[in-house]
Image (cartoon, grey):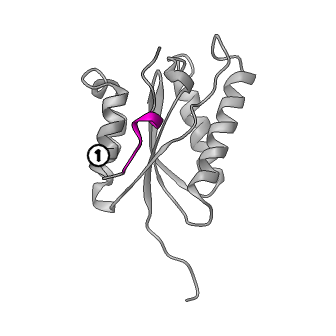
Amino acid sequence: MANTYSQIHIQMVFAVKYRQALILPSFKDRLHDYITAIVQNHDHKMLAINSVEDHIHFLMGFRPHESISNLIRQVKGDSSEWINKEKLTPKTFRWQEGYGAFSYAKSDIPNVIRYITNQEAHHRQQTFLEEYIGLLDTFRIEYDPAYIFKPPA
């Protein structure tokens, strides 16, 4: 075959370390722009991004030239470094270890975009922990409860 063809859509979900409410409205949009630039600089396509105080979701068209883990390492490392350098939070900002990566068919994309866009309303009815376990269950991903994102202390 002369070329590589793919259609891979992945929703990424990850939390602030210790689930601290550190994604502040004052820089939330700038954070989304910064992460979008990282994703696009790695030659992937950002389709939707949104966050609430303690976690973030984004949906991307993913190209298979790199691993998901490499991209997320870059996104988390570069964005936390930027937040700290700009002094955007009252304390040191870190992302929690781990992430969720969920793949979707092209026909699911409008619903996933709507879901990500409406995170604020969604989380008035469901906690992040309930949401995350729901995603794992929906996708039939086996998990050890000891390694699930912990509720904030």
The residue at which mark 1 appears reads as 137
> How many numbered callouts?
1
User: Which residue is found at the position 63% from the left and 15% from the top?
Assistant: 89
Where residue 151 appears, as percent x and y from the top left, is 42, 22
Which kind of residue does numbered mark 1 sit on?
A: Asp
Q: Is residue 29 left or right of residue 151?
A: right
Q: Residues within 10 Å of mark 1 (few under 14, many from 20)?
A: few
Q: Nearer the viewer, residue 130 or 6?
A: 130
Q: Nearer the viewer, residue 137 or 145?
A: 145
SS at circle 1: helix
User: Which residue is found at the position 45% from the left and 31% from the top?
Assistant: 149
Please identify the residue farthest to the top as the structure is shown.
Answer: 90
Q: Magenta stretch: residue 58 in it?
A: no
Please identify the residue farthest to the bottom as the structure is shown.
Answer: 1
Where residue 5 appears, as percent x and y from the top left, is 50, 76
User: Which residue is found at the position 64% from the left and 55% from the top?
Assistant: 42
Q: Quadrant of residue 125?
A: top left
Q: Is residue 63 left or right of residue 59?
A: right
Please identify the residue farthest to the right as the structure is shown.
Answer: 85
Where residue 32 appears, as percent x and y from the top left, is 54, 34
Where residue 144 appears, as percent x and y from the top left, is 41, 41
Please tell me whether residue 129 is drawn above or below residue 39 in the rendered image: above
Q: Which residues are magenta?
A: 142-148
Q: Magenta stretch: residue 147 in it?
A: yes
Please tell me whether residue 28 is drawn above or below residue 50 in the rendered image: above
Q: Quadrant of residue 22?
A: top right
Q: Is residue 88 left or right of residue 102?
A: right
Q: Dividing the image into 4 quarters, which one contains the N terminus?
A: bottom right
